[in-house]
Amino acid sequence: MNERQDAESTPLSILCVIHSLDGGGAERVMAGLASRLARRQHRVTLVTYADTGGDRYPLDPEVRRRCLELRHDATWRPGKWMQVRRRHRAVARVMASESPDVVLSFCDRNNIDVLMSASRRSPPIVICERSDPAQQSLGMLWNSLRRRVYHRSSSAIALTETSARFLRRLCDRVIVIPSAVDPPPLESDRVAAAERKTIVGVGRLEPEKGFDRLIEAFAGFSEQDASWRLLIYGEGSEREQLLQQADQLGIADRVALPGWVRPIWQPLSEATVFCLPSRYEGFPSALLEAMALGVPCISVDCESGPRAIIQHGMNGLLVEPSVEGLREGLQRWVNEPAERERLGRAGRSVVEDFGWDAMVDAYEQELRTVVRSRQTPRERSSRPLLRWLRWWTG
């Protein structure tokens, strides 16, 4: 075996960092990726700020878990500086004590934390954006920090080429690796699902997910047929606001927000139609899962994500990013049940198009590439703001 082949077969020590495993597509992918890397004999340690109490996704027993039990607050206020300082010091201690070959970080603010915690002695750091960074504003200070620290990464992974174009302005090395979807563990009875007349949405109840406009579109659409129901699975800050909106529109009896349900396969399999109304997306897991089941899917055609998954009119519908666009798409599915089921069946190909093996292969190859290059985080910026922030946070 030559030196290159030996390097390719040597297990890596990988430190994975994410805020939590509490719901969401990024958490699902991190749990699945860490588990599959561990099954390939790599030494994988998963670090979360939160403890295991809120975990919604299982890990392979070979994955070591370290919980920092530090709350990750997205706001920057004077009273939060000590919390930020503790978080950065904790991440730096973990990197020093674990001494991994490479660090793999998921999600924007988490990436900033990890990069600001690094020193010249830290291992290579690979960051992953799990949404569309061109659309997702982090606030003035977080946006500024992202511009200042992302160049310190050894590599950045985007979900789509659209997101990669944005990241190339901040990072030297950017590659695209789409998310993966599991083969469904059950079948969807499409005859029974059609009779239920149920539209399903899944996601965090936050403004960017667009459930407010789905509710408004459903209200207009269901004026023609009051037998349809809307179920939105998830939790978030807009829960009460969405319930109030449904009540004001006179459809409270036909709209339900059951919260998070894990696994989501059973509720998805019972859907007549799945709808993704997001204002922007990364690479939506719920859409992949619904398509894998053969559920007819409608998605807003936002800048990144859905258009990389749905081929309009071939395996789903892409609609204009508006209430009217959603309403027209829903009405079309009601009027054309045979066409909607045909496109639903075609959507099952996502299991082959976005399989786990290909995704893990791509991550494993990129991690080995940065380890071989020995590119560690760059020296600290001389910019006064960043220098002061790094001093304060440890």
Image (cartoon, rainbow, N blue to C red):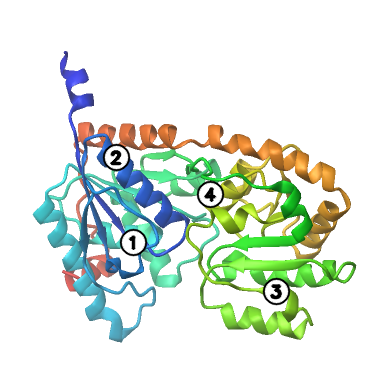
Q: CA distance from mark 3 to mark 1?
A: 34 Å
Q: Amino acid at mark 4?
A: Phe
Q: Are marks 1 and 2 in contact (CB under 8 Å)?
A: no
Q: Mark 4 or mark 1: which comes first in sequence?
A: 1
Q: CA distance from mark 1 to mark 2?
A: 21 Å
Please state the horizontal and vertical placement of residue 291, each as a whole percent of the image.
63, 45
Q: Amino acid at mark 2?
A: Leu
Circle 1 SS class: helix
Please state the horizontal and vertical placement of residue 28, each as a whole percent of the image.
42, 53
Determine crowd level at label 1: few under 14, some 14-19, many 20+ residues with C-alpha closer than 10 A.
Answer: many
- Please say if 280 is above or below 158: below
Given residues 304 and 174, the one toward you in this image is 304
Q: Which residue is mark 3?
A: 255
Q: Which residue is mark 2?
A: 37
Q: Nearer the viewer, mark 1 or mark 2?
A: 2
Q: Are marks 4 and 2 in contact (CB under 8 Å)?
A: no
Circle 2 SS class: helix
Q: Nearer the viewer, mark 4 or mark 2?
A: 2
Q: Mark 4 or mark 3: which comes first in sequence?
A: 3
Q: Which residue sits furthest left?
A: 97
Q: Which residue is mark 4?
A: 283
